[in-house]
Amino acid sequence: MLSESARMSSAAEARFRIDAPNSKPRAVKVIALDHASERVVKDLAERSWNNATFFTASAFGQAPRQGESFAGWLSDLAGRTKNLIEEVNSADLVVMVAQAGESAQAASIIGEACSVKRVMTTALVLGGAKISDDALSKTLSQLRPWALMLVIANADEYIADMLTALRA
Amino acid sequence: MLRKEQNDLLTQTGPGTPMGRMFRLNWIPALLAEELPENECPPVRVKLLSERLLAWRDTQGRYALTDEFCAHRGISLWFGRNEENGLRCPYHGWKYDHTGQCIDVPSEPAESGFCSKIKLKSYPLIERGGVLWTYMGPPELQPPAPEWEFATVPAKHSIITKRLQECNWLQALEGGIDSSHVSFLHRGDLNTDPMFKGAKGNQYNLNDARPFFEVVESPGGLYIGARRNAENGNYYWRITQWVMPTFTMIPPRGDHCVHGHFWIPIDDENCWTWSYDYHPIRPLKESEVAAVRAGKGIHVQYIPGTYRPTANKDNDYLMDRAAQKRGETYSGVGGFAMQDAAVQESMGPVVDRAKENLVSTDNGIIMMRHRLLRAIKGMEKGEQPPGIDLAHQRVRSAAVVLPPDQPFKDAAREALIAKPGVAPASV
């Protein structure tokens, strides 16, 4: 007689798996950290997503000074100012997108907000294969303290695959 | 999550499938050399990539991997007589040489030349590192023999085993590159298994159950770095290698062996898990060989006469709820290898990835799938997939402590390349 494990791991039994949704859409906020990645994020935003929204922090080269408000530090892709804290508050995951070799300084502010609110962060570095190790290191050093998961991808389309995989 | 058509694309490896084509462009492990121990030994049935084959060794010691079935009436040549440089079908006496060429049809006059018109499909079979490797792709694209370091070090430095895994190859591979499960599924074994215990790195693992991850594309596949806190603000990095389509190397611990796997499809619902342990600069100790034979580390014990693990789905993997309750094992299943196999097989023969909910720490898996799909697209344009180039095979995993500002792929660059006579980077 088959053991329960043998019977239950068969293809025949797989047909009886409950066919009902087992999750709700997660709110994923995708933020471009520089002008080059903003172009990639704009292309992404034109696709259909469950609950992903897209922003840019590329206009802000400098982090706010001590005591300065986070408000108005972020904008959507139409250029409307957004409140970083409000966006992080309603996020399940924040994805920061940076072009290798570009400044990713904004990551520290976004990362700090996510840290305070206990929101998971992922950083994606695009174009890592095309630039020098030193330039890549500079971008990484700005991202690493704030990204629980950091991905260096050679192909821009990875970000779409990642968001799809995460049901964003 | 993957759409059904993407899941089918990655999990199906039979003849004519894109993923099958990728496997067929590589030398893959077919069987252990010990399975064909001498000339004219009994043939061995081998199913690979959904093709039924027969491995055998002729009178001169030439290895053969041919269609399992006689071209005459389709009986299995496993019943054949291995004699005088050929395998003779016991039904009507048709005989084949090691290339599958029919060399005798007793019922036909030799002068008729009939047998020259009969040839079984066959694939090259070569020995390297205790493994018999085959290449099942187009002859004109056959690459040089494989150069994975475990297969090129002196024989006493390396040991390799295989075990039957009763699920699709991809869900087994995904377990192999999923670093974050170690702190849970294998928690009970890190400090007790003889192939792992005693390494300083184990304490970094156990003290920090929430590592940071970095996934970086490598020439042949991926580096998957798991970063934990070490002393003085430094980071302890464990860097796993994945080389396309199916090779992984797990970071070493202390002076223990380096180890890893191949997952080779038998068909779409079963695969061989190949598990190697080697040390680049020293022979394996007797105690290490004994531990492997006892099913420790990433190896298993077998049902005698088979490569099926003693603990398997037919006996509920010898589940021990009391050991689970006592904390000796986290899952109740004993041993690293069967802990992995049990959870992976429980998903079913081919898991439906449309139902899964991946999270950010699964980016290694997501990137692996992305690279396979990208390589399939590249193959359609005539590009060679990564992993075939010998330089992609000369790799090592590494465990290193680095200052916080150094990218692991640069700081550990030298450690990630196999260099004969050089010790592995390990903590």
Image (cartoon, coloured by chain):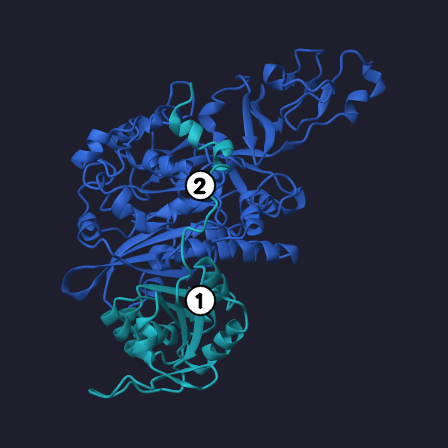
Chain colours: A cyan, B blue
Chain letter, disc 1 residue: A
Q: For residue A51, which numbered disc appears in the image?
A: 1
x then y, percent, for residue B224: 37, 56
Q: Secondary structure at mark 1?
A: loop
- Marks 2 and 1 share the same chain: no
x then y, percent, for residue B294: 29, 27
x then y, percent, for residue B58: 58, 21
x then y, percent, for residue B350: 50, 40
Q: Number of callouts in the render?
A: 2
Q: Amino acid at mark 2?
A: Phe
Q: Nearer the viewer, mark 2 or mark 1?
A: 1
Q: Amino acid at mark 1?
A: Asn
Q: Image quadrant of residue B53? A: top right
Taking B51 as reference, is A91 left or right? left
Taking B156 as reference, is B123 left or right? right
* Vertical position of residue A88 compared to residue B169: above or below: below
Q: For residue B262, which numbered disc appears in the image?
A: 2
Taking B404 as reference, is B345 left or right? right
